[in-house]
Image (cartoon, helix red, strand yellow):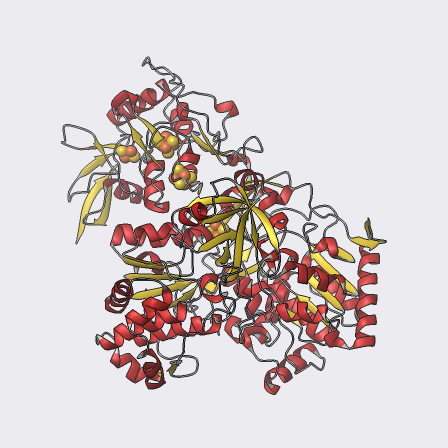
Amino acid sequence: MDIKLTIDGKEVVVPQGTMLIDACRQAGADIPTFCYDPDLKLAGSCRMCVVQPKGWRNLVASCVTPAQNGMVIETDSPDVIESRKVVLELMLSRHKLTCHTCEKDGECNLQDYCYRYGVTESRFDGKVHNLFKDDSNPFIERDYDKCIMCTRCVRACDEITGARAINIMDRGHHAKISTAFDGELVDSPCVFCGQCIMVCPVGALTSKIAAGKGKAAQNDKVLTTCTYCGTGCTLELNVKNDKIVGVTSNRDPELSPVNRGALCVKGRFGWDFVNSPERLTTPLIKENGEFREASWDEALGLAAEKIKGIKEQYGPDSLSMFSSARITNEENYLAQKLMRAAIGSNNVDHCARL
Amino acid sequence: MTNSINELESDAKCIFLIGTNTTENHPVIGYKIRQNVLKNGAKLIVADPRKIELAELADVYIPFKPGTDVALFNGMMNVIINEGLADSKFIENRTEGYEAMAEIVAKYPPEVAAEICGVDAEDIIKAARLYAESEASSVCYAMGLTQHSTGTDNVKSCCNLALLTGNLGKPGTGVNPLRGQNNVQGACDMGALPVVFTAYQNVTNDEARAKFEKAWGVTLSGINGLTLTKTINKAYEGEIKGLIVIGENPMVSDPDLHHVEEALEKLDLLLVQDIFLTETAKKADIVLPGVSFAEKDGTFSNTERRVQRVRKAISNVGDARQDWEILCDLSTRLGYPMSYNTPEEIFEEIRTLTPSYAGISYARLEGEGLPWPCPTEDHPGTPILHKEKFNRGLGLFHAIEYIEPAELPDDEYPIILTTGRSLYHYHTGTMTRKASGLDEFMPSNVVQISSPLAKANNIVDGEKIRVTTRRGSIELEAEVIDGIRENVIFTYFHFAETAANYLTNASVLDPVAGIPEYKVSAARIEKI
Ligand code: SF4
Ligand code: SF4
Ligand code: SF4
Ligand code: FES
């Protein structure tokens, strides 16, 4: 059944059971959120998404309040704005503001909303807690002095990966995110998938592999398919100055059909081999047991000459080719075409069985 | 896979994992299975000699002896038939060969199967009931099922089980091989196999050959080619003189590496095209630098047959060249000119020769990609195979007897060695061991051994031990764990310096697939 409501003067029709946040967004309102994540269970804890239903005593958190027939909602009233400012100031009061060196600079919800509501400092006297930061793992930087306790990381860890490596520890003002015994991730069930980084709205969780190489907001992002296992996850290569500087993921199921943004440790953190100084950059020819650099013309010329020689002397079936489960379809097609059409043998295989 | 990955997260009501350590080797598929169990209460059966992560969540965990897969399947089918849990309508309408299969299966009551597998008969019964009684059951497997001298039999048995219970052609069901490498499906689809052109068109079939001869303008050989393992053997015997290796590393990935090494050394020409100087490239006469996935345009086909785009993000590194350009140049120099402007042009040619890809174009691949078969431009792709009928019409049951693994433990080599992969590395480590985080996290190999076995040999956790088989020995750090069969040890094959494949057996291969028996080698261990 559909219901009708008025949002910022606009009428919208939504199915019964729709949350206010979705109704508001349908009406074109830009609702700020921290803890809300459409793929995860609702937390309704940050109160950033508040809106004002006409005739109600209190503002409501739109992400956890179902729309009702006939509601009249304001999403930008002075009360709403004031309330959101208080939320931001409370967060700022315990947030280590180091935007200039933060990996998240430019795509941080806290930064964006403070800008949007002109919140420059906090009237609350909080203190930075210097919470646990050291972590011996090579993948994930956890800086909980930047944590705003939205708990999205906890939910992603549980509801996407199912690792349950982290949880909320203590309550109230002392609440924080930690592993079971407030220890390091390496001693927890963490599998370093980085789903927590993916959902963190601020710079509390970041990639150590990408650190310092380029702020994600400033990188170009190229959607591609992971080079590792056969799952075929979609990921975004982050590019700066013609170099791979990171991997992020895209949660849109239309663009990331298999994994919907989820990755594993290899996909998310295993990309920097691309920049390895050990990459081969020029053809090599072995002479007297040692390699020497060669031009393409020389190397390919020599290869062709030797192949032709073997074919003439021993026939095409004395040659064989291992194509690859790692190169593209197009390249595999050409490889077998070369073996069959140019050399004349069906001796072509790859490591499908290994 | 006959079905798609995301069905494992929602549609499958029972998932049977055999020979797949999914959370380590296909992690994102592993997450989905785990969520289905935790959120939707899907039933989970795990059969593996090691107590893998997902075994902790399983309704039934069967720690069976490596290589006894057929006995396990036959035992389960015996229960299903005797308890009247088979899908008789499906058998009647969609299959043939039931009687012959049932006759063999009758010889494997759960007690007999349990004896062979070294497990409780009760668990076989329970697994059989769960699988047969659930509304939609999916069986997933990986190399744990296939890397045996009876690999083909194992897979056929797995199909038997699905046919017997009608678990094919519907959402959440299927026989689902989880394929290890990003584009192993695509390499097969593209005819990088010794017996077929693209889309599995046989090279011995005159019609298929005529089609490719016409398209390519040459006469083609109608003799089946050599598999990878046979190529190595023939090189050893001096019959193969020249080998071109593209992005593969047989010096780590192939069985019995001493044998591989000798074989490669006998070649007149070893030409290697790769992005790193791999252990194999070091043996080459000529090395050609190709580029990584980040530098190329093209397509990969994943384990659910979904063709997806690979997009170029950066320029070629140094003087390296696009792999397709290298192939074109080499072919041209061999007197068969090949010339394309882009990978898309190559794909357009592939479409014309490959019925299952005919309807796919780069334009259509923007967004979700397409699972083949996709025969026409308006075809939506095929996430689920065998919906109304099988490729051959009726689904064929195979009557399969259990055959022991080729190399069983004896007095001299009393332990079973089995090999596999880690979450933190990929295949021969060419890429992951040069990824800083992965390499730092897992810099070296270990051998997992059960506490009782460790105790009996006076070995403590972290100690270096020697593992020996009939092929050779390697020294490895022992990791003493509880979740492994007492008489089984496990090691990873990613590490060149302690390569597990110095130990594995190249002399017995599955007679049909030519796959080596990586999952069972007789071994012994010693303190150093
Ligand atoms: S990396 Fe993955 S497993 Fe580890 S805490 Fe983050 S979400 Fe959980
Ligand atoms: S670490 Fe990030 S995602 Fe987790 S609670 Fe803090 S702010 Fe939220
Ligand atoms: S991200 Fe992990 S699970 Fe996904 S394709 Fe890459 S290796 Fe496989
Ligand atoms: S976004 Fe609604 S309460 Fe946090």
Query: Residue B212 vs residue B56: left or right?
Result: right
Q: Would residue B206 be visible to someone looking at this image?
A: yes
Numbered label tally: 0
As drawn, A148 above or below A22: above
**Ligand 1 is found in which quarter of the picture?**
top left
Query: A46 or A62, which lies in front?
Result: A46
Query: A318 or A236, which lies in front?
Result: A318
As drawn, B332 above or below A149: below
Of the 4 image quadrants, the one containing the C terminus of chain A is bottom right
The percent coordinates of residue B378 (x first, y second) are 45, 71
The percent coordinates of residue B174 (x first, y second) are 36, 68
Q: Would residue B246 be visible to someone looking at this image?
A: no
Query: B157 or A247, which lies in front?
Result: B157
Query: Residue A259 vs residue B309: left or right?
Result: left
The percent coordinates of residue B15 (x first, y second) are 32, 61
The percent coordinates of residue B285 (x first, y second) are 79, 58
Query: Residue A238 vs residue B11: left or right?
Result: right
Query: Residue B266 vs residue A22: left or right?
Result: right
As drawn, B477 above or below B378: above
Q: Residue at x 63, y 82 (%)?
A: B209
As drawn, B191 above or below B28: below
Write down the quadrant of residue A331 in the picture.
Answer: bottom right
Of the 4 image quadrants, the one containing the N terminus of chain A is bottom left
